[in-house]
Image: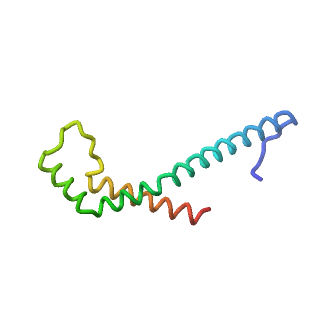
């Protein structure tokens, strides 16, 4: 254990209570994040299929030709953006498997 400052009994209880609360908060946040991460697996599969499809290529080309309204959100047509997001997902997925 690291060098602990001298504490009386009440200070020690307060100190460890704060540590317990911090760990509890982190565990709850990680639990919620893990559920959200698991919940998007099918979305990732669909995005991977879309990125490799002729439909994505057509949508990309039509976007480049200016066929969509300017206000249409189309980040999914950013080849690097979508590819990088999917790559980040897979890297995080692998990291979670090796650490848990």
Residue for point 78% across, 45% down? 4
Check the image and tell me how it is coloured. rainbow
* Image coords of residue 85 (percent x, y): 38, 55
Nearest the viewer among 99 and 8 is: 99
Identify the image quadrant of residue 87. bottom left
* Image coords of residue 60 (percent x, y): 20, 54
Q: Is residue 63 above or below residue 71?
A: below
Identify the image quadrant of residue 14. top right
Side of 45 relative to 76 (left or right): right
Q: Which image quarter holds the C terminus?
A: bottom right
Count of numbered labels shown in the rendering: 0
Residue for point 30% across, 50% down? 76
Query: Which residue is at the far right?
Result: 9
Side of 76 relative to 36 (left or right): left
Query: Which residue is at the far left?
Result: 65
Residue for point 33% across, 54% down? 82
Residue for point 17% across, 43% down? 68
Nearest the viewer among 71 and 24 is: 71
Nearest the viewer among 88 and 48 is: 48
Side of 49 relative to 90 (left or right): left
* Image coords of residue 74 (percent x, y): 27, 45
* Image coords of residue 80 (percent x, y): 29, 56
């Amino acid at each position: 254990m690291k060098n602990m400052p001298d504490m009386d009994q009440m200070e020690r209880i307060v100190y460890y209570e704060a540590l317990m609360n911090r760990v509890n908060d982190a565990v709850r946040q990680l639990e919620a994040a893990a559920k959200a991460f698991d919940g998007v697996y099918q979305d990732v599969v669909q995005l991977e299929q879309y990125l490799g499809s002729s439909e994505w290529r057509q949508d990309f080309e039509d976007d480049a030709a200016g066929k969509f309204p300017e206000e249409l959100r189309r980040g999914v047509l950013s080849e690097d953006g979508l590819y990088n997001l999917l790559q980040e997902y897979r890297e995080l997925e692998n990291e979670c498997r090796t650490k848990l």
